[in-house]
Every structure is written in C-alpha cells, then in structure tokens.
Amino acid sequence: MLDPASASQNRRSNISLIFDKAVYDPLLLWRVANLCGINNGNCSHLCLLDFNSIYKCDCPHVMKLADDKKTCVGKEISPLNYF
C-alpha cells in the first residue's frame, strides 16, 4: 500500500528547480545610438527617430524643410489658404 507521506516526499525529491541567471557584459552588447540625442540630429526643429535608428528632420506645420533636409524655413502663405 502506498504511504501518502512518502509519496509526497518522493514527488518533491524528483522535482528540480531551475533558476536562470544571466550576466551581461556592457562591452559585448550591441549599442543603438540615438542620433537625435546628439545636437538634435543637426535638425533645426524636429528630429524623428525610427526603429532602425535612422533619423530624419521635420518641421512644424507652418514651416517646410529646406533643401539641406535639416533646416526649417517659413512657408509662403496665400491669403486664400490662411483660413
């Protein structure tokens, strides 16, 4: 006949607990640079960073991006489009 006390003890002795421990060396990890974090990405107004760590400059809605793709300049506003 099975003794409930010893059965319980046997089940517990057959269970091994697994604990994971991970150690990371900061010198070996990939580092993702926040290009917008350094001088705002050289953008005059908005620096937008995507998930690939590629950035682009952008402007508020009342401005447009100049040919250098870094500087915002004022838009010419027509009186017809003002309101």
Image (cartoon, rainbow, N blue to C red):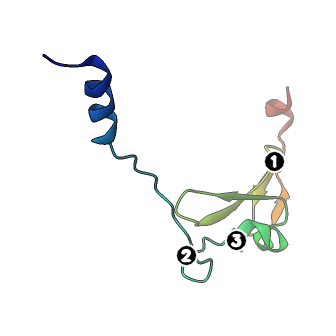
Q: Earlier in the sequence, mark 2 or mark 1?
A: 2
Give percent across and percent down for residue 61.
79, 43
Q: Mark 3 points at which residue?
A: 35
Query: Relative to 60, does residue 24 appear above or below in the rendering?
Result: below
SS of the residue under disc 2: loop
* Badge 3: residue crowd in 10 Å (few <14, some 14–19, many ≥20): some
Q: Label 1 vs label 3: CA separation?
A: 20 Å
Please state which amino acid type lies under the numbered disc 1: Pro
Residue pictured at 81% horizontal, 31% vertical: 80
SS of the residue under disc 1: loop
* Residue 60 numbered mark, or none: 1
Please state which amino acid type lies under the numbered disc 2: Leu
Q: Label 2 vs label 1: CA separation?
A: 36 Å
Please state which amino acid type lies under the numbered disc 3: Leu
Of the pair 15 and 50, the residue shown nearer to us: 15
Give percent across and percent down for residue 22.
51, 64
Q: Mark 2 points at which residue?
A: 29
